[in-house]
Structure formats: C-alpha cells, structure tokens
Amino acid sequence: MPSVPGRARLITGAGPMPVRQPSRPVLLAMRIPSCVLHVLVAATLSLAIWLVPAVAQERPAGQPATFGATYDELTDQQRLLLDGFFRRAGAILGVTMDPRQRYDAAPLSSRSTFSAVTHALLSSTLTDRRSGQSLGRTIDIIDYVEGVRGQVKGAPGDEQFRVYVALKPGAREMVDNAKEFRHTADNTFFHQSYPISYRQDGYPSIQISMARDASRADIDVDYRSSRFPVALVNGHLSAANSDVRAGNLDRHNGRWSGLVNWWDGLMGSLFTADVEVPEDAPQTFPVTPRAGSKTIDVAVDDFLRSWLVEGRPNLAVSYVDAAAYDCLAQRLEKEGRALDRGLASLQLFARMRRINAVVGPRKSLAGTTRPLRLPDPALSVVDHKRQDQYAIYGVPRVLAEQMSCASYTSFGKLPPAPVTRQGGEVYENFYSTVAIDRPDRAGAALGLLWQRRDGFWKIVSYQAVWEDAADAVTMPELMKPAAPVAEARVTAEPSLLQANERFLDAWLVRKTYDDAVAVIAPEAYACVNLYLDQGETPKTSVAEQSARLRAGLERVSDQAGAAPRLEEVIESVEPTDPRLRVVDQPRINAFHLLGVPDWMGPTLTCEARLARGDTAATDEGLDRDYGSYYISALRFVNRGEPGAVLVLGWRRGADAWRIFSFKVIGP
C-alpha cells in the first residue's frame, strides 16, 4: 500500500499509559529467523507459538541426507536439474553461475519448495494403466527446470511454492496413460498459461498443470483439498497449502516417506507436541508482567529484553494472556493434537529458553532485533526510543477487535473494512513488529496483539509468517511471461443478473437463507457430496443434501460478517480460460458473470461430475454456441490471502434462472 501510516499519540513517560477503555486490544509483531521462527511455530506463544506447528522428522541412523538444505545434500538427479537450470540462466545473462553457490544462497522457501516437490516426483512412479508396465518415475517427464518459486510476498497462492519446468516430448502421453494420475477439470481461474491439470488420487497430491501444447508445466504439491465451505472464507489454506514447512511435513511423509526436516536446523526438536521441561524450570511464574503497568513501548521493550537479553523467559511468559493460547490451540487442533492448558505456561517457558540457547548471549537488543515496516494507511506509527529495534503501530479499535485468534488475518494485513482515523486519537490498540535474524537462517515475521488486562499490557493474539533471510539471492526465472487472456464478450438476459443479485444479497447481506435456497434448483443439492469430510457418509436424500447445503451457506455467511453491500464481502475473479466469455454487467466488482459453451453446460451438473469423479470433460468435435449456460465466479474478501473461488452454474428453468450446480476451486 503506497500510503504512509500516520502518527499515533502515545505518552512514553514512566507513568501508566492513559487508556479510555482498558479492555481494548493492542498488537505487536516481529520477524524471527527460521530457527527462532520455528520455535514459535512449534507449539506455544511467545516466539514459540507464533508459527504453525509441525512435527520434525529425525533422520534414521545410517540414512544419508539426500534431501537437504545444500546443493551437496541433493540427489544426483536433483543436482542435474539445477546444473542445467543455472547453466541456461547464466547463458541468458552472460555470466557464469555456480550451481552450488547459487542454490545454497537461495531463499530458504525456494530450497524447501525444490526439495519437497522433487522429492515427491522422485518418489512417485508411473505405471501404464493397461499393460501394468513401469513408465518410470514422475520426475522423468521433466526436460529442464525454468524456475523455482518459494514464498513470494503479495503473489496469489497459485504463483508460490512450485517448480516451473519444460517437459520432455511425450510427457503428456506418459501421464495420461499412468494409472497414478487423473486428468482433472481444466484450470479456469488459476495457473494462467497452464490450463491442463493432472492430479494423483487423494491428498497430498502432486498437481501437474501443463500448457495446452504440453511443452511446459508448473508443478506443486497440494497438501489439503479445497473443502466447502471452509475453503471459501479461510485464506490460510491457499499458499500454505503447497508449503511443506506450514505444518505439512507429516502429510508429505505420509505419502512419500523420507523427506527430512532440514530447514529447521537446531530448532527441529521444537516441532513436537511437548518438550522436555528443564529440571531447573520455575514452579510458578509472575502473576503480573514486570513493566506491564507502564506504557506500551516500555512493555514491549521489557518483554523482548527480559527474554532475549536477560535470558529470563520466565519473566517474558508473564506477558502472555490466556486468550493468546487459543491461537496455539487452534493450530494444534488442525494437526490432530490438543493443547494442555494447565501446562501451557511451562511449555512456553521451555521453548522460549531454547530460543535463548539458539540466539546465544546478547548484551542488548541492538544488533539482536530490528523493526519490520508496515506501510498500511490504517496503521499509525508510534514514536518511541527504540525505532531501530522494533516498530509499534496504533491500530483503530474497530480493526483490533477483528484480529483475534479466531481471525485468519495475514501478518501485517488489516481487515478490509473502511476505517477513518480520527485526528488526535489516543490509540488503545497497537501493532508492533520485530525481527530476530541470523545470517545463516531464514526468519519469520511475528505479530502480537496486545490488550490492557486489569491494568497490565498483555499479549492476547499473534500472527506469524515465514520470512526469508534478507541477504538471500533470488533464483532466476526462465519462464515465458503469461499470455494475456482475450476477453471475448457475450450477452445475457437482464433476469439472469437479477437472479444472481437476488441470491447473493439474500445469502450474504440480508442473511435470509430461505430466500437464498429458493434460487437453488434441487439438482444442485447433490454437489455437497463432492465436498464431504474424510469418512463422511454421502447424503442420499434431498432433505439431507438440502440441510447440508444450507448449513454450509449459513456458516460461510456468518464468518463473512455483516456488510451493507456485496462489494465489501466478495470480489470477482478473472478467468484464465479463453472459452469463458465475459458478460458486461454493473456488479463486475463483486462477481464475474461468464458465458460457457453450450456443450460444456451438461458436464457441469452435479450428477455428471459425481459420475466421472470430477475429472476433465472432453470437448473434441463439439459446437461452440453460447447462451444456454452461464456461471458466476467470486471469492470472499479475506483478511488473509485470497481463498478459493466459488463458481455457481446457472440455467433457465421453467419459470426463472436457477443455480443448477456449484464448485469450489482452489489454487
């Protein structure tokens, strides 16, 4: 965002900070290196709970480090791909690139992506579905690598955590004939320039998205499926769905065993449900934080100083409010684990002390921490004495109330609700950032939400994302730029637009669910069976299907919140499929209305998709008439990364336009 934050009024003297309503929240944010970051992820608050939990994999005795952080730890085939990649890049740039040096200096997220994707490809065989003969390994379809993308700030999920490749001649035929892969529906809103999609059965799954001429592909691993309704309102499931570091290592090794968690370095042992509590751990912790009654800048400073400089995490733990453990509990629940709240403080202390051991003795925060700048116009910069060590921002109360552990807000990104800053406002809520870096590790951006509790500043929520080291060297990219999609136009009856608006308004604005369901044709109910939870019994009766669909609609609408206009809840999504034709209409900011070829309409029905397993429908030799079928495409305005796309199929019934099908499409 180009705007510069304003300045927040804050009294920084020794006395307590004046607050109008002591129960309002405040926020702090930090960046921490992967080693420190991972502690956060591990399983508790402080830096330890800030990150997504995962379980580290110890390398069995005698097992070589074939998948590692460095070039020398890769397999021969992985190194061969990198050698060709850097040789081509060097030839284009007119320089010599040493593969070992360039790969080892690449961002951690790029290396972990390359390791995970190529490990899955090396571990996945191809078998001819007719003869049963081996076709080799999936990695054998690659001619050479064109690019590796790890975490890319601001990029959509389908442009992160993937490897771009040129394919060998006959690669598509190999995958088509392999029983391990199925040709799924074309990519119509994601993976621009790579519309042909192949996936393995189940999850996690390799997804190979090919160009139409099958000369190139982008390859990633999908660790979770796009479920209705959660995928619509939870942007947390987008880019992180292909990031092996984001709690996905167990899922990865559940299908392709042997990937070692090298990226955590010394912090690997912290990725366990519990840690061994040291014998000299305190039996009790201070009830009140040491400087919690002073101003927010003093409290933030004391939290960091007591922990990282004094090496007394028992004092830092006292700044963590019980509400903040909800963030950890939710993350652990996703991993099938539970938080023992009775031991949470003790576990937090143990992890924080391990971070002390990794960071080492420090005499000052100077040189230990640094601020992370957030140029968001809704934030107001707080002036304080340690601007070079951490940053603090005033946050309007209306936004802070939406930044609890229950919100899936991306780090540094505020909810989209419009906010008008009041001149001279005394902020009661704060967002602060700090980074703890080591030159040999990547880091993390950490956000802490603070609130006055009984007169003391306490941490009540947190956010965290992986952060590549500042001195990492981005890997070159040899991919061709995506070709623009020609937006052909088609017309539609005004009554179709009115039906769209009537359904969406009833569902998301007025929340009159009976009116919304009335626009849905009964044949669309069966689509709920395409999004069942694992082990859930298919819904066979119309009543069961209708109840499941309505419950999903209500859940999405509740999580989307109240809004007076559709444009504050949903946004349109640009198609990447040239077969879809745009309908010009006044609500294009809220949703796209698109014409589909008449031949395609029957393939979109729930019955047809259930019958073919939602694989691709063929269009050879079919006509290209339009006008009988349309779709509307939208996604929710999430506080995190963009969520999945919701596609609604429309067809005129006997009396009106009705929804005959729906589909949730993830990156």
Image (spheres, grey):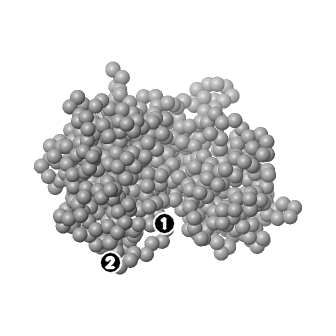
Mark earlier in primary sequence (2, 1):
1
Q: Which residue is farthest top?
A: 62
Residue, disc 2 = 424
Q: Position of residue 244 (x, y in %)?
A: 43, 41
300 or 626, nearer to the observer: 300
- Secondary structure of the residue carrying tag 2 is loop
Q: Quadrant of residue 130?
A: top right
- Secondary structure of the residue carrying tag 1 is loop
Q: Position of residue 456 (x, y in %)?
A: 29, 56
Q: Residue at x 36, y 23 (%)?
A: 60
423 or 49, nearer to the observer: 423
Q: Position of residue 566 (x, y in %)?
A: 61, 68
User: Is 547 displayed left or right of 120 in the figure?
Assistant: right
Above-or-below relation of 22 to 164 = below
The three-letter amino acid code for the residue at tag 2 is: Gly
Could you tell me which quadrant the N terminus lies in?
bottom left
Q: Residue at x 79, y 42 (%)?
A: 541
Q: Which residue is farthest bottom?
A: 423
513 or 442, nearer to the observer: 513
